[in-house]
Amino acid sequence: MGSDKGILTGKKILLGVTGGIAVYKAVELVRLFKGLGAAVRVVMTENACQFVTPLTFQAISGEKVLTDLFDPASELAIGHIELARWADVLVVAPATANTIAKIAHGIADDYLTTVVVAATCKVLVCPAMNTKMYQNPVTQNNLELLKGYGYCVIGPGKGELACGDKGPGRLEDLEIIAEHVISALTQKSLEGKRVLVTAGPTWEAFDPVRFFTNPSSGKMGYAMAKIAWRRGADVTLVSGPTWLDAPHGVKCKKVKSAEEMCDAVVAEYGDTDIVVMAAAVSDYRPKHFTPSKIKKGEDDVVLEMIRNPDILKKLGSAKVHQILVGFAAETDELIENAREKLVSKNLDMIVANDVSAPQAGFRCDTNIVKILYKSGEIEELPCMSKEDLASEIWDRIENL
Ligand code: PMT
């Protein structure tokens, strides 16, 4: 989320808070939304005010909190209608079984449920309640009704609840809720597309505890996968070993070696529309793997290396309808080397980064690239975060 600072600038989020123990987490949610740059207004039910006072939400949101539909002192003339028009997205978190039931049946008997009925924007409902209440068939049925009406139901998470029960019922992780809000406010320009992204390094082992690798952190590829999901794509991420958590909504297949990555990618290729290979795949691997740890001796050791499969070249030669995008990590002759890869691997586009430049390439949070197209055109982009760059690259892929 840190890298998404300001991403919701200019967007308006209406947060509906209902009466459950997770109300205290909703305060943090307001802070998270504000950190993303959004304007936030809060509507609380009477029961929610039993857990946390409106003053707390007012202090964090910087806006008067709305609780009373008939408040004569309200600055809004017809509050529920004006608020419903104001919001770009409405998030009900936590959503109790009672409020879910009311929304599912069109009951509008307080400020929040009245706004929900009047809303035409996307509505995200985040259930939080005791496990038995959540599993009650009536609640389950109501949630299905909500989904059927086009509401987006997020969570709940699983774990230990305030009442001591264990199971589903916790308010979903706040970062996941925020991720859904960002997605709800993102144009679905990749809807219906199946996207395959590779990321990270490969490990080429020569004994059980030692391997050859490179400094790829996976950040560039994970950013590409994350933005594709936000734009509505069905995303599979094939990742070499990294410390990163898989982006929300993305199917992640973990692999170690180039050969494993090759198998995973080839298995997905037929059904894929767009492939983005951001992984730093090792071109060579040790010829022999010793099953036990190689012992230190007096003599030097010579290891013989053999070629790994060139995954992208394989995809390029089997290309039918797919769009293929490669990355080129270079230290010299950036354009010439990248162009050679674009042509020899039958790519539609290649993103060339000079990995010896500061603020570019491996590990850092930023990158500086030149994009080469099949047409011969070259486009130079300034230094930017890997997330912003991923958006720029997707804009260009969508134009292909
Ligand atoms: O992970 P980060 O720390 O964020 O760093 C990002 C990055 C520097 C790894 C990324 O921006 C990048 O440049 N990725 C490509 C690295 C690379 O392997 O470049 P290459 O020039 O060796 O390969 C060209 C293309 O062929 C790449 O798309 C690569 O995935 C692919 N390839 C390479 C070798 C091989 N055996 N099979 C392949 O498919």
Image (cartoon, rainbow, N blue to C red):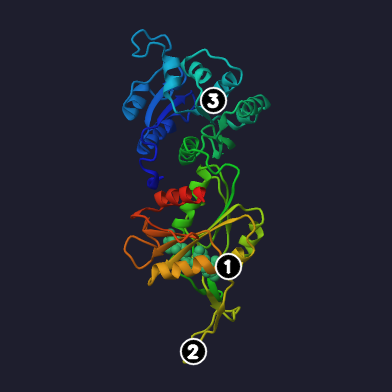
> Disc 3 designates what residue?
96
- Identify the residue at horizontal 57%, vertical 15% (top origin): 107
Whether residue 189 is visible to the viewer of this picture, yes or no, is yes
Distance of label 1 from label 2 (alpha carbons): 40 Å
Q: Which label sits in the foreground, 1 or 2?
A: 1
Estimate the x, y position of residue 214 in percent, counting from the top left.
45, 69
> In the rendered view of the protein, which quadrant contains the N terminus?
top left
Q: Which amino acid type corresponds to the residue marked 1 in the rendered image?
A: Lys
Tell me the mark number nearer the camera, choosing from 1 and 3. Answer: 1
* Badge 3 residue CB within 8 Å of ligand 1: no
| Residue 70 appears left or right of 108 | left
Gap between marks 1 and 3 measured at Cα:
53 Å
Residue wearing tag 2: 297
Q: What x and y, as percent, mark residue 374?
A: 50, 60
Q: Secondary structure at mark 1?
A: helix
Q: Residues within 10 Å of mark 2 (few under 14, many from 20)?
A: few
Q: Which residue is mark 1?
A: 313
The three-letter amino acid code for the residue at tag 2 is Gly
Secondary structure found at label 3: loop
At label 1, counting other C-alpha atoms closer than 10 Å, the crowd grade (few under 14, some 14-19, many 20 or more) is some
Question: Left of 30 or right of it: where is 172?
Answer: right
Q: Is mark 1 within 8 Å of ligand 1?
A: yes
